[in-house]
Structure formats: structure tokens, C-alpha cells
Image (spheres, grey):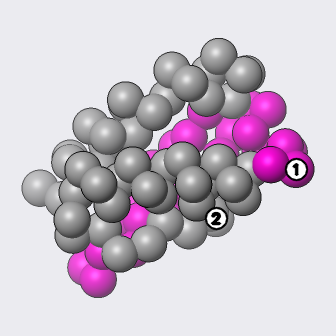
Amino acid sequence: MLKEKVEKVLNQVRPMLQADGGNVELVEVTEGGIVKVRLTGACGSCPMSTYTLKLGIEQKLKEEVPEVKSVEQV
């Protein structure tokens, strides 16, 4: 159930990433609310990817899915 909620929010974020040639792939959602993602395309090598991850993806996930504690890049 939690994984489906996370994927739904990631689908809302994806168009913004894809506009810049990147994407995000959900790898895992742990029992403790840790979301593990892989940034791909232009996002994978972008020097700003940490900001995208924390200020964009993580913030949106925490707003929409309160069970999410943090987001990590793998």
C-alpha cells in the first residue's frame, strides 16, 4: 500500500524531471518509511541532483505521504 502511494506521487514529479531529460525510478520502500530511488538520464549526472532529491522529491513525498521519513538515492 505504501509503495503504491509513493509511486503515485513520483508520477506527479516525473514530468518536471523528464522536461529536463531526467527521470526517477523507485527502487524500494522500507518498513521504516525510507524511500530509495535512482535518478536516471540527465538527473543521474546533474550536479544539482541532491537538491532535486531533497528539496523536490523528498519534500513532495513527505507532504503527500506522511509515512515517508526520508528519501535516499541509490
Q: Residue 59's spot in the image, x, y percent?
A: 44, 56
Spatial CA distance of label 2 from label 1 is: 15 Å
Q: Residue at x 56, y 40 (%)?
A: 24
Q: Is residue 37 above or below residue 70?
A: above
Q: In the rendered view, would you say 56 is above or below 54?
A: above
Res. 53 image quadrant: bottom right
Give me the residue at 84% from left, 43% from top.
Answer: 46
Residue type indicated by callout 1? Pro
Instruction: For the N terminus, give its image quadrant.
Output: bottom left
Of tags 2 and 1, the one toward the viewer is 1
Which residue is labeled 1 in the image?
47
**Mark 2 vs 1: CB contact within 8 A:** no
Neighbours of disc 1 within 10 Å: few (<14), some (14-19), many (20+): few
Residue for badge 2: 74
Q: Residue at x 29, y 83 (%)?
A: 32
Q: Is residue 4 left or right of residue 17?
A: left
Counting other residues with Cα less than 10 Å from the Cα at mark 2, is it few (<14), some (14-19), or many (20 or more)?
Answer: few
Q: Point out the stretch of residues depicted in magenta.
A: 23-48
Which residue occupies the foreground of this view, 64 or 74?
Answer: 64
Label 1: state its secondary structure: loop
Residue closer to the observer: 5 or 60: 60
| Above/below status of 6 relative to 21 | below
The residue positioned farthest toward the top in the image shown: 19
Could you tell me the amino acid type at mark 2?
Answer: Val
Check disc 2 and report its element: helix, strand or loop: loop
